[in-house]
Image: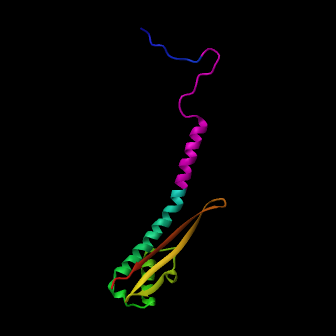
Amino acid sequence: MSTAVSRAPQGLPQRQAGLGMWGLMFVFLVIGFVALVTLKCTPIYLNHLKVETAINAVADDTSYSSATPFEIRRALQRRWDVDDVKHLKTKDVKIQRADNTRVLSYDYEVKVPLFANISIVIQFKASKRVRA
């Protein structure tokens, strides 16, 4: 009993099995694009995490429930100076009075150039009630 290997008929090229050069280039292009977007967006989300952490810390402190907007912004600015927060200023945080306490809210977007004239725009919006 012999095992026969299937071959292309005489004169015809053998069929390729596997990924060709163009297919491999396409796979590398997709991987490169995903890596580029990840490298551009990760610092923005890390910065937003710092913003969220600072706002939550100030909102969880009961001493700020009756504080003036200036005192709240000063507390946020101290935290943001230590954490090196970019893309959002303390004056862009809206501080409103509601039910004998304060509500901190923000709405901002960050535009990051990807390549050539293509950019990514990421929007952040949240609000947090200061504990009474």
Does the image show residue 87? no
Residue at image location 56% in from the left, 39% down from the top:
24
Left or right, 7 with reference to 58: right
Start and end of the magenta stretch? 9-36
Residue 111 point in image, percent of width and height: 58, 67
Which residue is at the far top? 1
Residue 130 point in image, percent of width and height: 37, 82
Residue at image location 38% in from the left, 87% down from the top:
99
Depth order, front residue of 77/57? 57
Rendered image quadrant of residue 51: bottom left
Is residue 79 magenta-colored? no
Depth order, front residue of 102/81? 102
Residue 13 point in image, percent of width and height: 62, 21
Question: Vertically, is 25 above or below 59?
Answer: above
Which residue is at the far right? 117
Image quadrant occupied by the C terminus: bottom left
Question: Vertically, is 51 above or below 2?
Answer: below
